[in-house]
């Protein structure tokens, strides 16, 4: 059974700070997804990674396949970045989700 | 391009009833997967359909079932509802033919919030 562990569970930061959310995953997961969920429930796919690094605007996602670890970084954080960030591993069991990081960016 | 559409958005049902939820994928996407999200268990994979065939299933009882139609629209059904079935049910569609999440990005709908009373 695939497993995904995410940390921290909760994170409060000031506007402008650099944010890092970490994710570790088990053998059997071949791709790692970072998702964003706002109040109301809808989920937006931010990145899908199987190697290296991806960047979109102020968001950067990295993955280390040997260590089975991925990070999501937010540069120059803004209150509109406040949301739940979820990492999910794709494998033969479908998508396996971490418990999410509840991020609050204070002005 | 329209996103993934789930209907209804909210639903209240009584214990013992059954419910059917609908998901219309993004045009051209042939894979649809379903997920349950609860405060206690978080997000959990229910099942995935591709070309009208269920090709992967999570660890849920047989009361949870689904199907996919030839136009890729999908429905999931929960029979004999229990209080614990109260959850946000999300579906996602993917363009490519591989198992969802392995080599293809998943695009999620807004979800259906089911309350069982």
Image (cartoon, rainbow, N blue to C red):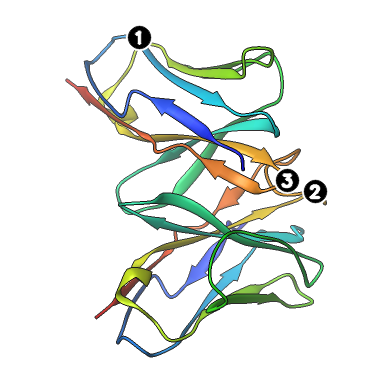
Dot 3: chain letter: A
Locate residue B89, reporting x and y percent: 45, 63
Dot 2: chain letter: B
Q: CA distance from mark 3 to mark 1?
A: 34 Å
**Which class describes the residues within 10 Å of circle 3: few (<14), some (14-19), or many (20+)?**
some
Locate residue B90, reporting x and y percent: 49, 60
Would residue A55 be seen by someone viewing this image from the given angle? Answer: no
Are both tags, 3 and 1, on one chain? yes
Left or right, A36 with respect to A82, comes to: right
Which picture quadrant has residue B17?
bottom left
Residue placed under numbered mark 3 in the picture: A92
- Residue that extends furthest to the bottom in the rendered view of this protein: B17
Q: CA distance from mark 1 to mark 2?
A: 34 Å
**Which class describes the residues within 10 Å of circle 2: few (<14), some (14-19), or many (20+)?**
some
Quadrant in which the N terminus of chain A appears? top right
The residue shown at (17%, 20%) is: A107
Q: Considering only vertical position in the picture, is B80 above or below A21?
A: below
- Are the residues tagged 3 and 2 within 8 Å (C-beta)? no
**Which class describes the residues within 10 Å of circle 1: few (<14), some (14-19), or many (20+)?**
few
Q: Earlier in the sequence, mark 3 or mark 1?
A: 1
The residue shown at (33%, 23%) is: A8
Which picture quadrant has residue B91?
bottom right
Are both tags, 3 and 2, on one chain? no
The residue shown at (73%, 70%) is: B72
Q: What secondary structure is found at the residue carrying circle 3?
A: loop
Residue placed under numbered mark 1 in the picture: A18
Q: What secondary structure is found at the residue carrying circle 1?
A: loop
Nearer to me, B73 or B65: B65
Dot 1: chain letter: A
Residue placed under numbered mark 2 in the picture: B96
- Residue that extends furthest to the front in the rendered view of this protein: A1
């Amino acid at each position: 059974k695939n497993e995904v562990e995410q940390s921290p569970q909760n994170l409060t930061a000031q506007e402008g700070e650099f944010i890092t959310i970490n994710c570790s995953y088990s053998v059997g997961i071949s791709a790692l997804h970072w998702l964003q969920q706002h109040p109301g429930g809808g989920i937006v796919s931010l990145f899908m990674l199987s190697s290296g690094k991806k960047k979109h605007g102020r968001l950067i996602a990295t993955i280390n396949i040997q260590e089975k670890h991925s990070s999501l970084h937010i540069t120059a954080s803004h209150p509109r970045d406040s949301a739940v960030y979820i990492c999910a591993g794709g494998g033969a069991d479908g998508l396996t989700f971490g418990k999410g990081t509840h991020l609050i960016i204070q002005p | 391009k329209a996103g993934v559409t789930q209907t209804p958005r909210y639903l209240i049902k009584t214990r013992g009833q059954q419910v059917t939820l609908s998901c219309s994928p993004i045009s051209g996407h042939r894979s649809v997967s379903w997920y349950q999200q609860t405060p206690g268990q978080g997000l959990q994979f229910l099942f995935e359909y591709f070309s009208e065939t269920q090709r992967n299933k999570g660890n849920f009882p047989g009361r949870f079932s689904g199907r996919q139609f030839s136009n890729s629209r999908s429905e999931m059904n929960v029979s004999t509802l229990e209080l614990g079935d109260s959850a946000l049910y999300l579906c996602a569609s993917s363009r490519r033919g591989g198992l969802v999440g392995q080599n293809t990005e998943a695009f999620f709908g807004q979800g259906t919030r089911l309350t069982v009373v």
